[in-house]
Image (cartoon, rainbow, N blue to C red):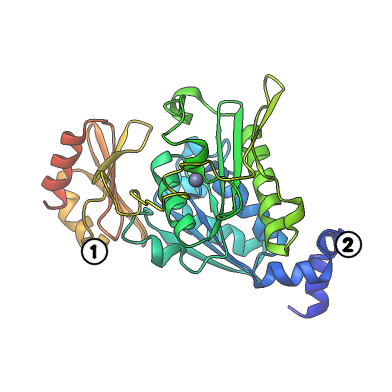
Amino acid sequence: MTSSELDERYSRQVLFRGIGVEGQRKLSAARIAIVGCGATGSTLASLVARAGVGTIRIIDRDYVEPSNLQRQSLFDEADAAESLPKAIAAARKIAAFNSQIIVEPHVADLIPANIAALLGEAHLILDGTDNFETRYLINDFAVKHSLRWIYTAAVGSYGVTLNVLPGQTACLACIFSSPPEGTFETCETAGILNSAVGLAASIAATEAIKMLVGADQWVRRTLLSFDVWRNERAEVAADKPRAGCRTCGDHEFPHLAGEGRPHITLCGRNSVQIHERHRPVDLAQMSELLKPHGAVRHNDFVLKFWIEPYEMTLFPDGRAIIKGTTDKTVARSLYARYVGS
Ligand SMILES: [Zn+2]
């Protein structure tokens, strides 16, 4: 693409006074990471990719399912039919509308052992996750390395977002020293409106753009929440760290140390994730081995195996998501029986 075509692509954004030619250059030089590419993550990714953020790393552990399509704006029916990993599907979609930027998909669960490799080079981290465990992990890492990140969440008709600027503003642990009440409500139990996600992600993407172009004077320093159904909106001051915060005050990073981190986790929608060890799996070979035991299907990224009433999804790094149970023992024994202990 020539520079005049580039000028054309971003012309309406460059015209916006807050960005201009200089801001657009900064966006193109920026490198960000998006952790989680479900509803919030795919909306964030779409917005920053269209805006011309130069390098976007997308980290997601999951695959596309039909129930995602109501709100996960980067995916389509073909992705769900193929059970494509969300990171891969997102990278393909983005390449179709902006081939001028670099997207680095990583099909992985963000954990203490890989966080430095996955997030270490990012100028800014965006939260597209659906769980507090990963958010506290990001918060530990970001505060420790003075990296900015933006917390964003949505459930039901409710959305919430917070900009974390280590050394300046409150961190996630300043606001929620433990997971907030009501976090047990998830998209699986309370449902979700795609417009609540869209609003939360739009606000967060705008804050990201401000930070990347250096418009810090406009960066919001509050915890902002809203309910699009009840027409409610609230802001809580977050312009300075809370005295006595273990994370940004005392520099204790228990989540980064992996304390108390389970090897098997519930990941919503009646399923269990097994990620206790890395064991590279040859999906084609595994597919042959599993054929006598049930229906099996695989592509380059994922293998699906049906053994009634369960459905196992296996990734090349040995991670598995077992659907049809919330019993970790059942999940572990299925994994041991068919993949190996
Ligand atoms: Zn703090």
Q: Earlier in the sequence, mark 1 or mark 2?
A: 2
At which x and y percent is residue 320?
Answer: 27, 48
At which x and y percent is residue 247?
Answer: 43, 48
- Residue at numbered disc 2: 15
Query: Which residue lies most toward the top here?
Result: 230
- Separation of marks 1 and 2 at Cα, in angstroms: 49 Å
Residue 84 seen in render: no
Query: Which residue lies most toward the front here?
Result: 243
Is 268 displayed left or right of 314 in the figure? right
At which x and y percent is residue 250?
Answer: 41, 50
In depth, the one of 145 and 311 nearer the eye is 145
At which x and y percent is residue 15?
Answer: 88, 62
Is 95 displayed left or right of 291 in the figure? right
Is 268 displayed left or right of 234 in the figure? left
Q: Which amino acid does the dot numbered 1 rest on?
A: Pro
Q: Which residue is at a point 80% across and 71% down the rendered structure image? A: 22
For discs 1 and 2, the disc positioned in front in the rendered view: 2
The secondary element bearing badge 2 is classed as loop
- Residue at numbered disc 1: 280
